[in-house]
Amino acid sequence: MTGAPLWGRAFHWSRALPRYQPGHAERVARVRERLHRLAPLDLAGAAFDGAGVSACVKSGREVARRVLGRLGMDPGAPPRGQPTRERSVRG
Ligand SMILES: Cc1cc2nc3c(=O)[nH]c(=O)nc-3n(C[C@H](O)[C@H](O)[C@H](O)COP(=O)(O)OP(=O)(O)OC[C@H]3O[C@@H](n4cnc5c(N)ncnc54)[C@H](O)[C@@H]3O)c2cc1C
């Protein structure tokens, strides 16, 4: 691209994405440690493990795996009432 832009505008979304305070990771680890003593309860999402959709998906998957593990369930098993992949492919 060459030439100067014809126009430009900057937007500042002051409350758009979380900006973690120093020590965030340690704080989240401490909270998770305390939660571990309670029912299978955990934290996932942009407030904890990184902003952005891909970080949130990763966070949600990891937490789901941990919670299922704490419930003694197989994280790799299909959800109850759902057909397995083989069955759904065959119809
Ligand atoms: C303007 C904007 C643009 C973005 N663009 C991008 C992008 O291009 N690419 C990218 O990777 N990321 C982008 N992001 C970031 C991404 O959208 C977020 O990081 C991600 O959606 C956060 O997911 P989350 O599940 O943690 O929280 P959220 O998606 O905010 O989900 C939280 C949910 O909890 C619900 N909720 C809140 N309080 C309660 C309550 N008390 N009881 C019950 N439910 C409640 C809310 O209604 C909401 O549905 C953007 C964010 C913003 C704001």
Image (cartoon, rainbow, N blue to C red):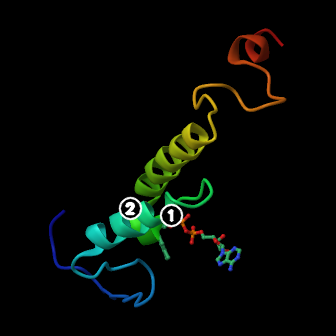
Q: Quadrant of residue 31?
A: bottom left
Disc 1: CA contacts within 10 A as few (<14), some (14-19) or many (>=20): some
Residue 34, percent from left and from top: 45, 66
Between 33 and 79, the residue placed more toward the observer is 33
Residue 75, percent from left and from top: 58, 32
The quarter in which the N terminus is drawn is bottom left
Determine the secondary structure under disc 1. helix
Does mark 1 have its CB less than 8 Å from ligand 1?
A: no
Between 4 and 85, the residue placed more toward the observer is 85
Residue 72, percent from left and from top: 62, 34
Q: Amino acid at mark 1?
A: Leu
Tell whether 50 sits left or right of 80. Answer: left
Q: Is residue 44 visible?
A: no
Look at the picture and state if 81 lies above or below 48. Answer: above
Q: Quadrant of residue 20?
A: bottom left
Q: Which residue is mark 1?
A: 35
Does mark 2 have its CB less than 8 Å from ligand 1?
A: no
Q: CA distance from mark 2 to mark 1?
A: 16 Å
Q: Amino acid at mark 2?
A: Asp
Between 15 and 30, the residue placed more toward the observer is 30
Q: Nearer the viewer, mark 2 or mark 1?
A: 1
The disc placed on residue 49 is 2
Q: Residue at x 41, y 67 (%)?
A: 48
Tell whether 4 sits left or right of 53. Answer: left
Tell whether 37 sits left or right of 24. Answer: right
The disc placed on residue 70 is none
Q: Is residue 67 visible?
A: yes
